[in-house]
Amino acid sequence: MKYKKITFACVLLGLSLYAGVCAATVREVADEAPASKQTIIADKKDKKLLNKKQRAVQITQEKDKIVVSTKPVAKPPAGTINVPAAPRPSLLQEKDGKFYFSGTQLPDDYRNIAIYGEAIASKAQAVAYILAANPAVKLACPVEELVELYWQEAKRENVRPDLALAQSLVETGAYRYGGDVLHHQNNFCGLGTIGGGVRGASFATPQLGVRAHIQHLLAYTQTKRPSTDIVDPRYDLAHNIRLERGVVNTWYGLNGTWAMGSLYCEKIMATYQKILAQQPVEPEIKPAPAEPVKEKNKKKRSMKQRVSEILQEKKIN
């Protein structure tokens, strides 16, 4: 009985010791847990502070209101200098009372140059400029023939041929084409082209194409009809519009009418000035050699002389 009491006391002692050890362990774990939570909270606060430092707070005060923007502001690299973009220069410049288009000086008072009148540039200058601007022209005839056609067709209607030719150079890119119109159409002024791949008008020969160009100019510039049969398919449409809104008589008047661009006339005048700048070498014209006297004439003269001699001999006898 005494032995059992001792054994029971030992068991109770052991249980008490075990309970004490477990309680101490739980307290250590409990003590460590808040420390871990505090560390996590501290990390979150540090991150928030770091984010706040990386954000620039822009405050704009408008009257009694304060607007706060928290959007990140991109900082340029160190040493970077912000230079504002330069404005795009205009193609048309004025300097000392002179106008320049893409660096080419335009004629004085070019805005009042009439569509009608005599040519100032020569045909040789026109040919020289075309071959210099585009040695590989796409034409259905020689350059010299096309220039001659412009002088013929334009002069018939009293239109300036040199400026009409300059307009065709603008319209065709110096006869490179490359747009909607193809070179074999003999369309030298973009007749009937409205974009989107529409080819426009076609003409059987270069002469008809040049005539249609001149007639289209007449549709814009005068009330009377051309002196030749109408070959311009858009003549009546253009003519009726100009009769309603008013005809134009200067190349500057084609701005916003023939072409929607505001510098259409300036392009024509710049091309015309380049034609005038050409100095072609005129071919030396040698006098035609005198025709040799035909042998037959010599014989005739010899017979006359012979008859005259015979008659004189008879008189003497």
Image (tube, helix red, strand yellow):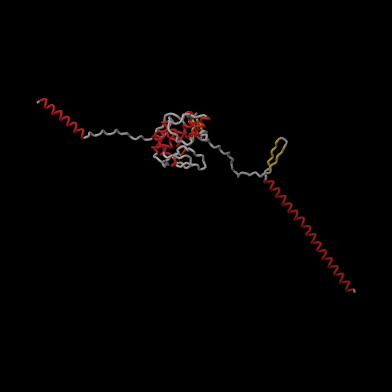
| Residue visible at 41% across and 33% down in the picture | 153
Q: Position of residue 90 (x, y in %)?
A: 53, 35
Examine the image and state in which quarter residue 130 appears.
Answer: top left
Q: Nearer the viewer, residue 24 or 44?
A: 44
Residue 258 shown left or right of residue 16 in the figure: left
Judged from this view, the residue extending furthest toward the right is 1
Q: Nearer the viewer, residue 99 or 295?
A: 295
Q: Nearer the viewer, residue 41 or 156?
A: 156
Residue 289 shown left or right of residue 240 in the figure: left
| Residue visible at 88% across and 73% down in the picture | 4
Q: Position of residue 201 (x, y in %)?
A: 47, 39
Q: How many numbered marks, from 0 up?
A: 0
Q: Position of residue 297 (x, y in %)?
A: 21, 33
Residue 283 shown left or right of residue 67 in the figure: left
Judged from this view, the residue extending furthest toward the front is 229
| Residue visible at 48% across and 40% down in the picture | 200
Examine the image and state in which quarter residue 133 appears.
Answer: top left
Q: Position of residue 287 (x, y in %)?
A: 29, 33
Determine if residue 215 is in view. Answer: yes
Residue 215 shown left or right of residue 49 in the figure: left
**Which quarter of the figure is the N terminus placed in?**
bottom right
Determine if residue 271 is in view. Answer: no
Judged from this view, the residue extending furthest toward the top is 315
**Which quarter of the figure is the C terminus placed in?**
top left
